[in-house]
Amino acid sequence: MHRFDVIVVGGGTAGAIAAVAAARRGAHTCLVDGAGHLGGTCVALANITPFHNSRGEAVVQGLAQELVEHIGAQGGTRGKPHLPNFAGIGGSFTPVDPEAMKVALFQLAEAAGVELWLHTVMVDALTGGTTVTGVRAHNKSGPQTLSAKVVIDATGDADVAQRAGAAYVQDTPEAALNATLLFRVAGVDTDALIADARGAPHKFVLLSDPYLRQVKKLSPGQVMRERVSDIYDFPYIYLSNLVRDYVPRSDWGEWGITGEDKSEWGRLKPFGARFSIMPLPHRRDVVTLNVTSLTFDATDGAQRSRAEMEGLRQMQLALEILRRYVPGFARSFLHTVLPGVSVRASRRIVGEYELKRDDVENGARFADGIARGSYPMSVAVRPGVREHLFVRDGGDYDIPYRCLVPRDMDGLLVAGRCLSASREAIGSARMGAQCMAYGEAAATAAALAAERGVAPRAVDVATLRRALKEQKAIV
Ligand SMILES: Cc1cc2nc3c(=O)[nH]c(=O)nc-3n(C[C@H](O)[C@H](O)[C@H](O)COP(=O)(O)OP(=O)(O)OC[C@H]3O[C@@H](n4cnc5c(N)ncnc54)[C@H](O)[C@@H]3O)c2cc1C
């Protein structure tokens, strides 16, 4: 039996930050991840977003901001890391070099004294009654048993909570947000892409947040003319309708297209309605493509395997479309297929509080707020098609500590996209910068609970918020 104060399961976006935060507070901390590196989905995306709301006010700092600065010190961000986001979906956009992010996370974990258990899969939870006391894991050395005063479930899919028998919710694949096999393409002439955007702003998603048009009085044409001269002025790019704007009508028959609505896109139907293109911070010819769209149950092993194959099929089709029709891509080539389909939605715990659509829309404040979110709620309206519901007045909302605390289980906290939130609210609360803030908050609470010998739900929230403020987190 290996004994720790805190075990973090999942070293992704939330979990890597959680492990560093717990170890810095003096907790003997172990981080378990099935992969061989840290950073999870944000490493695949090569960005961490959003650090600001649509008004330009910071919503996340603390350890997430320190990580961005650490990546920057290695040349892995732009000089000013947080870039404007004129798509109006999230207040700022922060591209990071994914390899520098992996290195930076290892350095922070090592300096904090985290014990890393990589290539180690959590297979079961250890429980005593309704308290989680540790996990069973498996790696090259065989089965492992690890115990802790507090376990943080940062698996994205709430694997620990589910194995422990905690209550959770999961939407049907059709009602949940789709998943995506991300890939990167090199050899892109991004100047040509930006010239197209400047000449025809209506082909791009611009200023979606009503606050930007109504209060800030920005217009898409004016923004493109006056503020955008290269890809880093317009880094969060969505083509608004691939078929209407790029595939000539004379070619529609070849693809089986019968109309501009996504339901009429023939062989291109599997793609998400918005084709998303994101630059890396230091290579203007390499972009990440967020375009494939997969509808399946991400907690079903067999379906997850099949989704990888379907993702690859869609990726090849997307490459053909990009090269033939989208300015700047004619001579592009495949650079990287990111490891594993990236999942937007699966299990979420039933927590002491469920974050709701009204809380997000109305910019709710909570006495136990431990993080702030500002991204609009992406909600699936039909497979592959999402709508965005915005926070009022370009603002932000609090995420209460209770969303990280399972209602029916002690010894366990969650961090990341498996927090307690409604189907709509998770569409906002799942973003990378927020997941990092949950990681810092859950770890700080876990360390306080371990130190004081109390259950995580009994941690004094005033003390927790004070500790987070001292760590420069925004609460
Ligand atoms: C396609 C897509 C596009 C997105 N776009 C953006 C964007 O542009 N910007 C942004 O900031 N956010 C974006 N998001 C949202 C955001 O990236 C994710 O919601 C967030 O990164 C999730 O963080 P997490 O820590 O919960 O999970 P992850 O980062 O996925 O980490 C989970 C970790 O747990 C490990 N793990 C899982 N199960 C086990 C187990 N049983 N045993 C051991 N280890 C395990 C995994 O290996 C992984 O490292 C996007 C999400 C998706 C899917």
Image: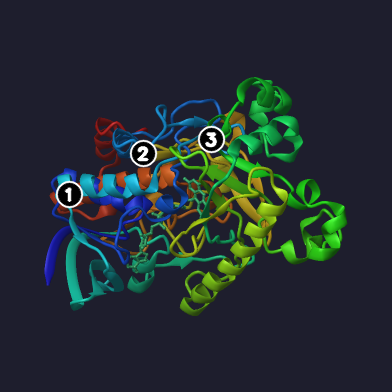
Residue marked by disc 3: 363
Mark sitting earlier along the chain (3/1): 1
The picture places residue 338, in percent across and down from the top left corner, at 46, 59
In this orientation, which residue lies closer to the viewer: 395 or 39?
39
Residue marked by disc 1: 110
Mark 3, other Cα within 10 Å: few <14 / some 14–19 / many ≥20 = some
Circle nearer the viewer, 2 or 3: 2
Mark sitting earlier along the chain (2/3): 2
In this orientation, which residue lies closer to the viewer: 254 or 61?
254
Image quarter where the C terminus lies is: top left
Using residue 435 as the reference point, say whether residue 108 is left or right of it: left
Residue at 68%, 45% (x, y): give it.
239
Q: Amino acid at mark 3?
A: Gly
Q: How many marks?
A: 3
The picture places residue 96, in percent across and down from the top left corner, at 41, 41
Mark sitting earlier along the chain (1/2): 2
Whether the residues at callouts 3 and 1 have beta carbons within 8 Å, the answer is no
Q: Quadrant of residue 382?
A: bottom right
Q: CA distance from mark 1 to mark 2?
A: 19 Å
Q: Is mark 1 within 8 Å of ligand 1?
A: no
